[in-house]
């Protein structure tokens, strides 16, 4: 019996510490036993250099604090997609101070594990849950009806519920602008594109990028390799290397890490990053990066929910969340000026990326002159524009677009850049 005393004392001590405000960890997405796929938010915070997150779902001391949880598909240290979302989370904390409490779980696989993590956050009483990957759409839709007092915000999907909205931004616009830069930079006229999955979000960005490339360099082509993973450093590097070996001298990406950028730099090639300003982490061989700035909208959603004015449903944001990072000194001044003028025209509403005439990569007219694609057509895009090498996920639909007085962004380029 004497051996049980220390155990009892330790138990009493731990209970006393808990009563004094010791924080508990966020939902542990490692319950499946796979340490390589998910960790608790406190462990993640330590790994990422962030302060320890709090998760007081069972504590009355939370009071009226507005509680927000984030579910990430990759580590916040990826310097890409999850990193960008986590910067917005930190901005929310800075904006609201002690009025808000945030936490996150990273490395959550799409599928059943995501369902478990999302439900765990909801059961702990979080007011707002951001699910930040396309593959979280169905898990979020499954959990949302069970917790009508919780607001769920899914990123990049297309399904909604009374307490589940879906949001995204027009990333295709900075993709197009970065294509102008890549098209002028290539000497081999072969540009590589490392992509995650052949889904509309990715295809839309690839097409916009290619339209930009060919606006300044009609002889250039874009080769795409799909890795079938959002976050896979080895796969991303391998795909980039294959494209480089195939003659590409500029590498672009729709991936979550800097590995394609590093592979390009090591090969003496140039590159276009994504998600965050990857030039900060790789160097000036990264000509620019289409980047996400989620903070203003995330802060707005939280404020509207606290005020009781949030409308939800489906929101497709503009360049306030999707923009182009500062350009590398290696970008020609003429191209920099062109990018600025096209950017201003699109922001001003006089030009748009997906306005005809646009051909698909089989040579058929996809969008007639005088027509522009609708949001619905862009959000369901599975066909390739002219200049993309390879077979598209789906055939080009007939009679795309509707009449518009906007001019195609390519019309602003004038003559090809020599």
Image: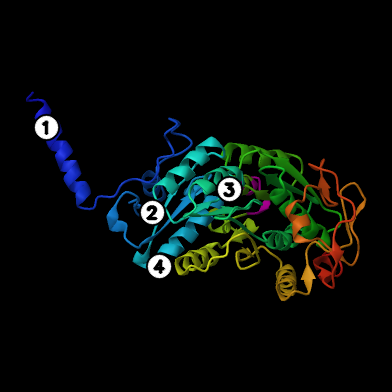
Q: Quadrant of the N terminus?
A: top left
Dot in front, 1 or 2: 1
Measuring 53% from the left and 36% from the top, which residue is drawn there? 112
Which numbered disc, 1 or 4, marks the residue that appears first in the sequence? Answer: 1
Q: Is residue 112 left or right of residue 203?
A: left
Badge 2 density bin: few <14, some 14–19, many ≥20, Cα 10 Å: few
Q: Which residue is mark 4?
A: 96
Seen from the viewer's position, the closer of residues 34 and 302 is 302
Badge 1 density bin: few <14, some 14–19, many ≥20, Cα 10 Å: few
Which numbered disc, 1 or 3, marks the residue that appears first in the sequence? Answer: 1
Q: Which residue is mark 1?
A: 6
Q: Position of residue 317 (x, y in %)?
A: 64, 64
Q: Are marks 1 and 4 in contact (CB under 8 Å)?
A: no
Q: Position of residue 331 (x, y in %)?
A: 68, 64
Asked whether residue 55 appears in the rendered view, the answer is yes
Q: In terms of secondary structure, where does tag 2 sit?
A: loop
Q: Are marks 2 and 4 in contact (CB under 8 Å)?
A: no
Which numbered disc, 1 or 2, marks the residue that appears first in the sequence? Answer: 1
Which numbered disc, 3 or 4, marks the residue that appears first in the sequence? Answer: 4
Q: Is residue 285 magenta?
A: no
Q: Position of residue 309 (x, y in %)?
A: 52, 69
Q: Which residue is mark 2?
A: 50
Q: Are marks 3 and 2 in contact (CB under 8 Å)?
A: no
Which region is colored magenta?
Answer: 264-273
Q: Are marks 1 and 2 in contact (CB under 8 Å)?
A: no
């Amino acid at each position: 019996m004497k051996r049980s005393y220390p155990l009892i004392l330790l138990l009493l001590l731990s209970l006393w510490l808990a009563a004094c405000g010791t924080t508990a960890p966020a939902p542990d997405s490692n319950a499946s036993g796979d340490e390589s796929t998910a960790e608790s938010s406190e462990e993640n915070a330590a790994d990422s250099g962030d302060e320890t997150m709090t998760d007081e779902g069972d504590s009355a001391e939370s009071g009226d604090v507005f509680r927000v949880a984030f579910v990430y598909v990759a580590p916040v240290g990826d310097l890409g997609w999850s990193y960008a979302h986590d910067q917005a989370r930190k901005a929310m904390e800075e904006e609201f101070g002690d009025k808000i409490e945030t936490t996150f779980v990273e490395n959550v696989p799409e599928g059943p594990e995501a369902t478990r993590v999302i439900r765990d956050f909801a059961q702990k009483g979080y007011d707002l849950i951001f699910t930040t990957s396309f593959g979280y759409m169905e898990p979020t839709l499954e959990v949302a009806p069970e917790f009508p007092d919780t607001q769920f915000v899914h990123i990049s999907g297309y399904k909604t519920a009374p307490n589940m909205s879906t949001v995204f931004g027009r990333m295709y616009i900075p993709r197009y602008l970065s294509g102008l830069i890549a098209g002028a930079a290539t000497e081999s006229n072969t540009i590589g594109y490392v992509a995650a999955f052949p889904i509309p979000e990715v295809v839309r960005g690839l097409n916009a990028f290619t339209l930009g490339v060919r606006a300044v360099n009609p002889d250039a082509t874009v080769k795409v390799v799909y890795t079938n993973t959002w976050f896979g450093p080895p796969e991303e590097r391998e795909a980039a290397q294959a494209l480089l070996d195939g003659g590409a001298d500029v590498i672009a990406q729709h991936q979550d890490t800097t590995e394609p950028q590093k592979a390009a730099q090591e090969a003496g090639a140039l590159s276009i990053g994504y998600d965050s300003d990857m030039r900060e982490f790789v160097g000036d061989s990264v000509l620019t990066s289409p980047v996400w700035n989620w903070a203003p909208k995330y802060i707005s959603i939280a404020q509207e929910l606290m005020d009781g004015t949030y409308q939800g449903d489906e929101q497709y944001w503009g360049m306030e969340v999707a923009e182009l990072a500062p350009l590398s000194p290696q970008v020609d001044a003429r191209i920099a000026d062109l990018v600025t003028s096209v950017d201003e025209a699109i922001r001003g509403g006089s030009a748009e990326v997906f306005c005809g005439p646009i051909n698909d990569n089989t040579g058929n007219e996809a969008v007639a002159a005088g027509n522009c694609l609708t949001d619905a057509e862009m959000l369901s895009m599975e066909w390739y524009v002219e200049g993309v090498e390879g077979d598209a996920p789906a055939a080009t639909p007939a009679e795309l677009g509707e009449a518009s007085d906007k001019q195609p962004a390519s019309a602003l380029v004038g003559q090809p850049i020599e």
